[in-house]
Image (cartoon, helix red, strand yellow):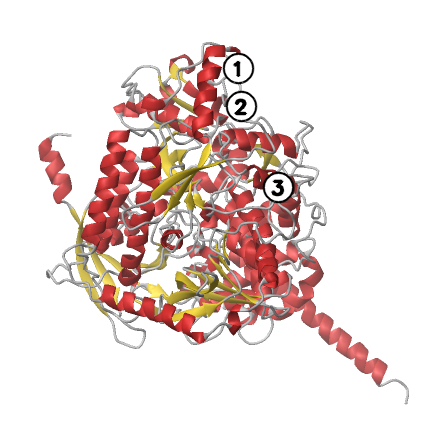
Amino acid sequence: MDTAQASAVTTKTVTFRIWRQDDPNKPGHFDEFKVPYTKGANVISCLMEIQRNPVTVEGKRVPPVIWDAACLEEVCGSCAMNINGRVRMACSALIDKLEQPITLEPMSKFPVVRDLSVDRERMFNALKRVKGWIPVDGTHNLGPGPRQSPKDQSVMYVLSTCITCGSCLEACPQVTIDNDFMGAAAISQARLFNMHPTGKMQSEERVRSLMGPGGIQDCGKAQNCVKVCPKEIPLTTSIAVMNREVTKLMIKDIFFKEEEQKSHGGPG
Amino acid sequence: MAAAARFTVVGGGLAGLMTTIKLAEAGHQVDVLSLVPVKRSHSVCAQGGINGAVNTKGEGDHPDIHVKDTLRGGDFLAEQVSVKGMCYAAPGIIYLLDRMGVTFNRTSEGLLDFRRFGGTLHHRTAFAGATTGQQLLYALDEQVRRYESEGKVTKYEYWEWLGTVKDEGGRVIGSVAVDLRTMEIRTFPAEAVCLATGGPGIVFGRSTNSIINTGTAAGRAYMEGAIYANGEFIQVHPTSIPGEDKLRLMSESVRGEGGRVWVPRKKGDTRNPRDIPESERFYFLEEKYPKYKNLVPRDVATREIFMVCRDLGMGIGGKDGVYLDVTHIPAKTLDAKIKGVMEIYEKFVGDDPRVTPMVIFPGMHYSMGGLYVRFEADSRTQTPLEGSPVNQSTNIPGLYATGEADYAFHGANRLGANSLLSCIYSGMIGGPAMAAYAKNNATSAAAMPEKYFQSAKKYWEDRFATIKAMNGAENPYALAKELGDIMTENCTVVRYNDRLKKTVEKIRELKSRWKNVNVLDTGNVANRALSYTNQLWNMLELGEVIATSALLRDESRGAHYKPEFSLPEPKTKDPREDADWMSLWRKRHEKWAKTTIAKHAEQGPQISYEEISTPVLDPEPRWYA
């Protein structure tokens, strides 16, 4: 590379409009930043550059931007945010593929902590609701687990790669910041544990957990979840499978109720 | 101690969660402090698998062979009793994870599948695609969530551990931590505290580690008197993709599944790699190591790749980088076994590795060293005595360490797929050790005078107030970058004493410049710059330990390589047949086969060496040709 090119590269910049909100209860605003362009840069590497020089285009010194991140390889689920109006992981958002100015906003279906950082507690609570675990008897040595076919494993593995990033909730028209719809992620986890040979033993409990307020019937079948999932998890298939299970259980409930009534109201 | 006591576990990765599960299962109350929701801990980044000599492939594998591979892989610097315990427990651990629902890959018979990994000739690595760490962490996360919903575990996520609370005698009776959202500082009384806080990758700036892995907790514990051991042993992973924000790991499982490392035989060959015929490719690992081929231990592969690029100038395009090639493997097989890493390469580089060979270079990955911990050996088996309060205990009473934060299991070099194992095993013996320790204490921490907690809390409130008022000229993030750059340059693959001396001097300079930091943020909510400025000091302390320990160890061993002090090549293929070389080796071994002990002092780390007992395996020369 000759020097003319080199200087052209170093003077190239990337422009960001970033949502700033000091406090969940205070109004927010946008700050604009320019950072030097580097090949292979992504949104996170630019946010890091802003940390080292937190000055807006107006030359105003501001606190560094607050955002959530950890692994930077799309496996921890931390850095989901709205980038140019679309929810996605910031670490895999390559600058070369984004239109500028790049607008960064926090997800809107979760309470803002500060700037781009949000509180996704509702997702972890939903995992408790669906009892997303295998209730093992203990951690002592009880020998191998149940055998499983490679085919089942390949389905379960994909379901198990959910990183709880919240993209599916963010994209879902049925989820709002103040309602309690559990969203696609937790429903898909219920499917995962109900497929496992041991998890099957509690399948009715998990299916029941999907009934009632905030449960699976709140799904409006918009199918946005599956489009934005960074792990390409077949979320709508999971919802359909679990919907069927819920329907089956409801019919069973009605049937048993009738049976029960019959037996109770026998010849008097 | 009451029947159900309260403990604190710091860190929600595999080691922390297993420690937690063991305590909760025994009926105790556990407070888990974590910088992030535990499900987002760095364990998720582990890709390749977990080792255990389950021997389902008819290869005659056995835990004893696993012990030997591990001790040899670590060039006889590992703590032998704990290694033996770990390798013997490994098959049971894999079965336990299987019972918890980990989606391990299966054979056609429905059994667990195992793959090859570095430093062994056996199929010993159970795996869930190429995101095994993620799958293992989720399994433990789910179990802890179950205990949480039963009220046995309380998670404090987005809380940062700051330091211990000690009584007059120096016993740890709790911790001080800060809520990273509200910035509230409070104390957590505990019968014992376990640091399961992972490694110090971010001390090196860019590494394969998550950005939360600053090593701050271990650094602080060291400042409070905990011994930091073997700090100089830093694993540089042979295959990572360099990036602006981090070095992304390309799992060893890529080679385990048949991936081959090569460069064009002709320097500066600009042809498309697919157009270069077999005969014009230099498979340098396969040529030099016909037995282990591409699966030599990491330190060996890293040095070979580094030298091919830096010394021979044969890197691709004359730059740092060699091919990691899987294009000869059917795409279907790749997707079934290592899809996770294929996708990372595709997403972050833009090329499809199924058709175009990947370009990789070594990157800082793991710390073999860490907080010094002890074990009590069962004299019959030479494995850690079940239920002994000594296991995983640091030199500070009541303070324990598990996982990458401890120094014990990997010696001078860690074998791939042994880290998930050591995390879980150390938690399995660490949890019961903490409970046993608490049982032996006459007074419960909860019954200790309030003054200890008040003064510890006040110390941290004052320190944070002081940092919050810092308005000097230095940007803490820019200082951290300077630290990372010099550590990566001088403290990774090849080490020279003159450069290490300069590194130590530079760190001292950074320490004095730290005092002129501008905290950048005076906010009262989620003030990360405030917590980071405090962390940065602890990172500088750890950096100083690592560089000083490296400077003082004048030999080459495992990941610590000093050309000026390396033994010559033996004259025979099996070095044991070269008598002259053997006497050189013995001399070096007697002098240096010791644990590096670093103790904190104002003027810098005080380094001494401790003899290693070898009740399990006698040391021998380590070679893989």
Label 3 marks a residue whose chain is B
The reply to whether label 3 and label 2 mark residues of one chain is yes
Mark 2, secondary structure of its residue? loop
Which residue extends farthest left?
A: A4
Q: CA distance from mark 3 to mark 2?
A: 21 Å
The N terminus of chain B lies in quadrant: bottom right
* Residue B431 horizontal side relative to residue B356, left or right: right
Q: Mark 2 vs mark 1: which is more N-terminal?
A: 1
Q: Residue drawn 14% across and 42% down? A: A10
Q: CA distance from mark 1 to mark 3?
A: 29 Å
**Residue B582 spot, x, y in % from top left:** 48, 16
Tag 3–tag 2 contact (CB < 8 Å): no
Q: What SS does tag 3 mark?
A: helix
Tell me the residue at 33%/53% (across/down).
A90
Numbered badge on residue B620: 2
Residue extending furthest toward the right: A267
Work out whether residue B193 or residue A243 is closer to the camera in this orientation and state it.
B193
What label does residue B85 carry, if any?
A: 3
Q: What's under tag 3, amino acid-wise?
A: Gly
Mark closest to the chain's N terminus, 1 or 3: 3
The residue type indicated by label 1 comes to Arg
**Crowd class of label 1 (few under 14; some 14 to 19; many from 20; radius 10 Å):** some
Q: Mark 1 = which residue?
A: B576
